[in-house]
Image: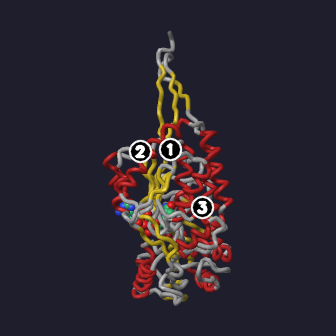
Amino acid sequence: MNKLQDSALLKTSSFINGGWHSNESTFNVSNPATGAIVARVSNAYITETQLAVESAKSAFAAWSAKSANERATLLRKWFDLILENQDDLARILTLEQGKPLAEAKGEIGYGASFIDWFADEGKRIFGDTIPGPSSDKRIVVIKQPIGVVAAITPWNFPAAMIARKAAAALGAGCTFVVRPATQTPLSALAMAELSQRAGIPPGVFNVVVGEDARGMGKVLTQHPDVAKFTFTGSTAVGKTLIAQCASTVKKVSMELGGNAPFIVFDDADIDAAVKGALASKYRNAGQTCVCTNRILVQENIASQFTQKFVEAVANLTVGNGTDDGIDIGPMISAQACHDVNKLVNDSIAAGATAVLGGTYDDRGENFYQMTVLTNVTNDMPIAQNEIFGPVSPIITFKDEAEAIAMANDTIYGLAAYFYTRDIGRVWRVAEKLEFGMVGINEGIISNVAAPFGGVKQSGSGREGSKYGLDDYMEIKYLCIGGLDN
Ligand code: NAP
């Protein structure tokens, strides 16, 4: 941390109502590449979480009453400060999460782009006028901010998953409380420090950091003053949190797990497909929700694709994310490596072949070898579960119908990818894939202008784009009568 240009960005306690709240109890944040302790963070509990919700509730009246222009000016200051401090924020992110510095810098820029976007989008919250059912009536539709928004976010994108939610919430006129993942609280707290410097009023953006996920989660999902709950994380935890939100009938949006198929048809540009698969699979050491989980290759080009793909994967440089020239950092924890290794071993026992890697990496307990498996079938555990690690199972298919059936044979529906040069196939396959986002001849699909989100058990709601504000607004209809007199 001594390499930070602005050491005041390293905060270690919860940010509530514009102030820093610490207590005696602490937990350690460690660098996944080395195990070294990066910071000791003050442990917030239920009481602090309740306080944060109450502050957000108090701040709502004034924040929602500001004009969209006034809110945009403050959001733009926050955006500018994030970009001015991008190098420091990236370093903090790499130290707590592990991804290479260049990738961390990219995440900071990606997250900031949502603040820029929703600063403007807040000015375009348009209503409607609708012809009334009789001549003495007019119908007017207005949109209003929903109120206090509570969020829980994961460790794999410690900054961007918060920015994507907070930007839309604040742009819409809502106030916000987030509980980041225990492993990665520092990026969230640095964002809070910059929100304060930007002049965002106390209580509008609150961050509570603590190990008590269940207790704090209950406050955020059950508190009567929370109007909307938004979660990014696993499908299993998402289901629990949806159930908890039922008691107060909160509006809910869920960005959950994925199992992305990456289909390569025999008319594809194979080099482009290799490049796309590499980017989609191995970014963040395979720990993204839109990661390629299964590579489906048409059988007559399977050996050609596999050879080129294995060569490309073997060329990736793995190491400590803060070192120069690193493509891939560690996984988040030793447990995450064990989970991936079990999926690999179970698949090998069921008939798969490791043509590259296939076990732990000797760089440390959080590193797993870049792995490619062949002879995989779609019913193997590695194909049916979210791998969340640097492993590519390759499955072959005969024709388009079989590829689509295999691709859709999963409970998840977040992202899918396919490569083809046939325009008819582009439309046919895109329309039949049961996923919220489809990359066609493209392996990197996330950007601020596009609606991000899934179908099936990958969740509900959309983040980013012109649709992203809808999750933070209520529609109100005004019936104006007595106009004939
Ligand atoms: P996770 O285990 O579901 O945890 C996510 C967050 O939920 C963390 O902050 C965690 O806190 C908290 N949490 C866990 N159990 C809880 C409970 N009972 N009550 C309240 N909060 C609870 O997921 P993860 O392993 O961190 O993240 C990976 C998952 O996120 C993957 O499935 C990935 O696909 C998904 N994801 C989805 C998207 C998307 O946009 N669709 C984006 C990124 C990631 P602790 O840290 O304290 O455990």
The answer to which of 52 and 339 lies nearer the viewer is 52
Q: Please say if 74 is above or below 28.
A: above
Residue 202 falls left or right of residue 324 = left
Q: Secondary structure at mark 1?
A: loop
Q: Quadrant of residue 443?
A: bottom right
Task: Classify mark 1 as within 8 Å of ligand 1 or not, answering yes or no.
Answer: no
User: Is the C-beta separation of discs 3 and 1 under 8 Å?
Assistant: no
Mark 3, mark 2: which one is toward the viewer? 2
Q: Earlier in the sequence, mark 3 or mark 2?
A: 2
The answer to which of 375 and 22 lies nearer the viewer is 22
**Could you tell me how far apart the alpha carbons at marks 3 and 2 are, in whole angstroms?**
28 Å
Residue ID at (44%, 77%): 336
Q: Earlier in the sequence, mark 1 or mark 2?
A: 1
Mark 1 neighbour density, 10 Å: few (under 14) some (14–19) many (20 or more): many
| Badge 2 amino acid | Ala
> Could you tell me if residue 235 is visible in this image?
no
Q: Earlier in the sequence, mark 3 or mark 1?
A: 1
Residue ID at (50%, 71%): 39
Badge 2 is on which residue? 227
**Could you tell me how far apart the alpha carbons at marks 3 and 1 are, in whole angstroms?**
24 Å
Residue ID at (55%, 45%): 201
Badge 1 is on which residue? 174
**Could you tell me how far apart the alpha carbons at marks 1 and 2 are, in whole angstroms?**
10 Å
User: Is the C-beta separation of discs 1 and 2 under 8 Å?
Assistant: yes
Q: Which mark is residue 410?
A: none
Badge 3 is on which residue? 446
